[in-house]
Image (tube, rainbow, N blue to C red):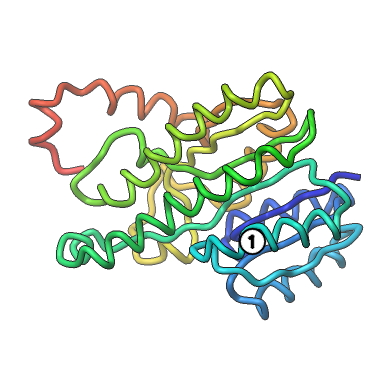
Amino acid sequence: MQRILIIGATSAIAEATAREYARRGAALFLVGRDFGRLDAIATDLRIRGAANAVAYRMDVNEQADHTAMLEAAWGMLGGVDVVLIAHGTLPNQTRCEQSVEYAMHEFATNGTSTIALSTVLAPRLQPGATLAVISSVAGDRGRASNYLYGSAKAAVTAFLSGLRQAQAPRGVNVLTIKPGFVDTPMTRDFKKGALWATPEQIARGIVSAVDKRHAVTYLPWFWFWIMQIIRNIPEFVFRRLRL
C-alpha cells in the first residue's frame, strides 16, 4: 500500500492525482486551506478505493506550521512514499507591477513556501521515496504576461535541481513537474485551444513519472519541445514578441 502526502490537495490537478492513487488502494493525507473541501475530497477518495484519506488544514505560507503538519502526516501514514506539492495561484501580473506587497505575497505562495516545504520534507523521506513538485513551463523563460509567476516557478525549478542532486545518494527522487496549459478553475477565463490538457491527463502523467522515477517531466510531453524552441529564441527577438 502506497502512502501519499498531497499539499495543495484541493487544486484540480492534485485532486485528479489523488483519485489515481485512490484507485490503487493508497492511503492519503490531504493538506490545504479549505477544510470543508478537503474533507469532501477525502470522503470521495475512500469511496473510490483509498485505504484511508484524511484532511488537514494548513496555509502553506505559515512556515511555522509546516513541522506540525509533517508530524501529523507521518503519524497517520506511518511514513510517506510519495509527496506531491501542488499548491499555487495565478497572480494578476498588472497588479504585481502596481503593488510590491501583492507581488511578494504571490511569490511566496508560488515559490518560497514550496522551497520551505521541500527543505523540511526531503530529509524525512526514506530511500525509494519521491518528492514530486509541480512547477511550470512558465519558469523556463520569463514572459511579459506572467513574469512574477514565472520567476517564482523558475526559483522552484532551480531549487529542485539542486535538491535532487543532494538527495540522490540517499535514494530519494526529486521530481520536477512542468505542466503547460491546463483547463482548471484557475484558468477558467482563458480561451482554450489544442495545447490545453485536462487535470486528469496531467494526473496520469504525474503518476507515471513518479513510478518511473523521472527527474523532470513536461506534461503533456510536447511541451518539452515547445519550451526548447522558446528558450532558444534570441533575446533581441524575444523581447519584441508578445507571448
- Label 1 belongs to which residue? 9
**Mark 1 surroundings: few (<14), some (14-19) or many (≥20) residues within 10 A:** many
Assign a secondary structure to mark 1. loop
Percent from the top left, x then y, of residue 212?
71, 26
Q: Quadrant of the N terminus?
A: top right
What residue is shown at x 35% (from left), y 42% (from top)?
138
Report the side of 127 relative to 114 (left or right): right
* Vertical relation: 195 (above or below) 40: above
What residue is shown at x 80% (from left), y 67% (from top)?
54
Percent from the top left, x then y, of residue 37?
65, 76
What residue is shown at x 76% (from left), y 58% (from top)?
71
Report the side of 11 relative to 18 (left or right): left
What residue is shown at x 64% (from left), y 26% (from top)?
167
Percent from the top left, x then y, of residue 95?
21, 66
Q: Quadrant of the C terminus?
A: top left
Work out whether residue 138 or residue 198 is closer to the camera in this orientation and state it.
138
Work out whether residue 157 or residue 44 is closer to the camera in this orientation and state it.
157
Report the side of 56 relative to 47 (left or right): left
